[in-house]
Amino acid sequence: MSGEVSGAIKLLVSDVDGTLVDKEKKVTPATVDAVKRLKAAGLGFTIISARPRSGMMPIAELLGIDEPMGAFNGGIVFRRDGTVIEHHMIDVDVVRGAMEIVGDAPVDTWFFADDVWYASTDQGGHVGSERKASAQDPVIVSDFTDLLAKADKVTFVSDDEELLRDLHAKVAAKFDTQATIVQSQTYYLDITPVAGNKGSGIEELADAFGISLTQTAAIGDQANDIAMLKRAKLAIAMGNAPQNVRDVVHEITSANDADGVAHAIDTFILNGVSA
């Protein structure tokens, strides 16, 4: 996608991991300052993420976000004061069916329900990162049966990219119209509700701000951001984004470890959009 984007942008919706935060899962001072400049100019700013609410609250506190935010890719739209505006859960038949498809494949399983992270193990190379992202420790369970009807997100974790792509294809082939099935990273296969996709999420957030999608900008880095980027008037990809994300945006900023969100705010929003 290319070409000039005209019209006043009134809201920036940002992804979190790989976008707003650096590789240490921190919001840098430069990004904090850029968000302050954005707000001082009278524009709105909020976040949407595959993270649970617990993992978004520290960022909301740091950036002073009192406006609606989207957890679980928009499955929960909420405010920092605890107000829940929208809450969608995965259909129990989808959860059960996905678990049956995955079967005994060598993947770790994470369930997010009732604001708790349940996991099949607390070992593995991505557990430490998720501890930071979700701002909580996993509760280890051997049987997820009691959680099937309460799941906000189910994640299957594996560093075997071919295996995870195969599982993605099999689950999507059966449940693509009944759930949002995406890989938020090459090693995470996420299942969220139908409404738990960032395309629906940015629409719900724009409505909550009382503005049109034609007044929104969005920034992200992964495949689960594409639906949001396609809906926004101004779509920005991070410098660390893969080609399939770059292909759907108007602008590309620097990487998340190079203050890409700050650069995007200053270059593409506050200083206008280049052709």
Image (cartoon, helix red, strand yellow):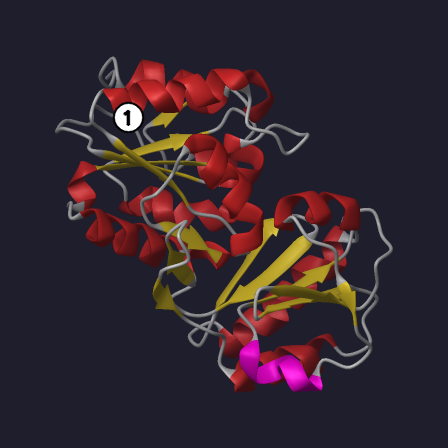
Residue 25 in percent (x, y) is at 63, 34
Rendered view: 21 above or below 90: above
Which residue is drawn at the image coordinates 43% and 31% (left, top)?
63
Point out the image quarter for the N terminus.
top left
Looking at the picture, which amino acid does disc 1 mark?
A: Lys
Q: Is residue 18 left or right of residue 132?
A: left
Q: Furthest residue to the left?
A: 7
Q: Is residue 222 visible?
A: no
Give the residue drawn at x 46%, y 40%: 60
Which quarter of the rendering shows the C terminus?
A: top left
Left or right placement of residue 188 versus residue 207 in this view: right
Q: Is residue 243 magenta?
A: no
Q: Is residue 215 visible?
A: yes
Query: Is label 1 in a helix, a strand or a loop?
Result: helix
**Magenta part of the chain:** 145-150
Q: Extreme front residue here?
A: 81
Where residue 139 sits: x, y (%)? 76, 66
